Image: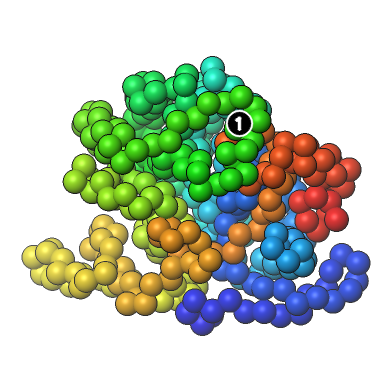
Amino acid sequence: MAANKISKEEIILDSGKKAIASFPVIVSASRSTDIPAFYADWFFHRLEKGYSSWKNPFNGVDYYVAYRDTRFIVFWSKNPYNLIKHLDTLKQRNINCYIQFTLNDYVDEGLEGAVPSVDFRIATFKKLVDKLGLGHVVWRFDPLILTDKIDKDDLLRKIEYIGDSLKGYTEKLVFSYADILSYSRVKKNLEKNGINYIDWSTEDMTDFARNLCEMNRKWNYTLGTCGEKIDIEQFGIVHNKCVDDDLIIRLAYQDHKLMEYMGVCIKQNNDLFGEISMPMNSIDLGNGLYAVKPDKKMKAPGQREFCQCIDSKDIGEYNTCPHMCEYCYANTSKEQAKINWEKHQENPFGENITGK
């Protein structure tokens, strides 16, 4: 398996026809829709079939993704309860994973229409950690949105309740400030639905970060921002990588094929006194082991300017998430998302999410 090289080969489709598919090693499922919440059964069926398809939102062309070489999956979800029953399948296929779990609290304000209660999602978070282990589930409160009904203190109070509840179950909190003006479609939908959002000023962002840092003294979570330009490292808040090579290495360093693909070397410390002198760009794995990363970064092409994610293959489709969040950037409209959800239900195991 060549380092950082995704192969492309011919596959046989369900119809018997042939097509060219990419064979990703790291899969993202998905930034575009909530696969664990709504399409988990579909995804694991397609994993068994060996491939799925997705439609490029920019040119409308169907592309095929095959799973023969897949070694790691990053799941994204606001309600990954339906994922729990499938996790043993990943283990059987020698596929590791972690979950970006967006656990917000906008229930009272109705900003996340189809999302279950906060306490249900906290319980789900804990079940996933019990099943997968600490580090495999990352807490996101994302986005942080200000409205005429939600101020900074409200957000901190919501975060504190969840943060207290997750103590011992998460190592990290990732957040971003809602940038409504950068997404004209989101702006239009919020205004259409009578939600009076308030833009974050630099002063507001800095003040919030300062207060969050103070709150974090009792948790000691790693705090990270997602895709943010603002530098608030003076509060110990880093620029996060959501598809994170460091975390993947830490969780799956024993997967030799995955490490070979990532260009990572696992080294044993041979110092007689047990002191590790690691080279730059290395990760301490404990037990006298450390990982040496390649000098060349695996940064994903085509992402936002300040995104730190490494390269992966996202398999979701826009306009397919039935959560109906008011601030969603992935749905053109609630109506279109509902239409596509209904299409999926008509053919729930088709090649792509919408049943085609």
User: Is 223 rendered above or below residue 162?
Assistant: below
- Please, what secondary structure does the residue beneath circle 1 have? helix
Depth order, front residue of 156/171: 156
Image mark count: 1
Q: Is residue 131 visible?
A: no
- Check disc 1 and report the residue beneath it: 191
Instruction: Identify the residue at image location x=53%, y=66%.
Output: 302
Q: How far from the left and from the top, in percent, is residue 251?
A: 41, 56
Q: How is the image coloured?
A: rainbow
Instruction: Identify the residue at image location x=77%, y=67%.
Output: 61
Q: How far from the left and from the top, in percent, is residue 122?
A: 48, 27
Q: How far from the left and from the top, in percent, is residue 62?
A: 77, 66
Q: How far from the left and from the top, in percent, is residue 339?
A: 82, 40
Task: Say what amino acid the circle numbered 1 marks.
Answer: Glu
Quadrant holding the C terminus: bottom right
Q: Is residue 22 visible?
A: yes
Q: Quadrant of residue 144?
A: top left
Instruction: Identify the residue at image location x=74%, y=41%.
Output: 337
Depth order, front residue of 80/31: 31
Determine crowd level at label 1: few under 14, some 14-19, many 20+ residues with C-alpha closer than 10 A.
Answer: few
Depth order, front residue of 51/352: 352
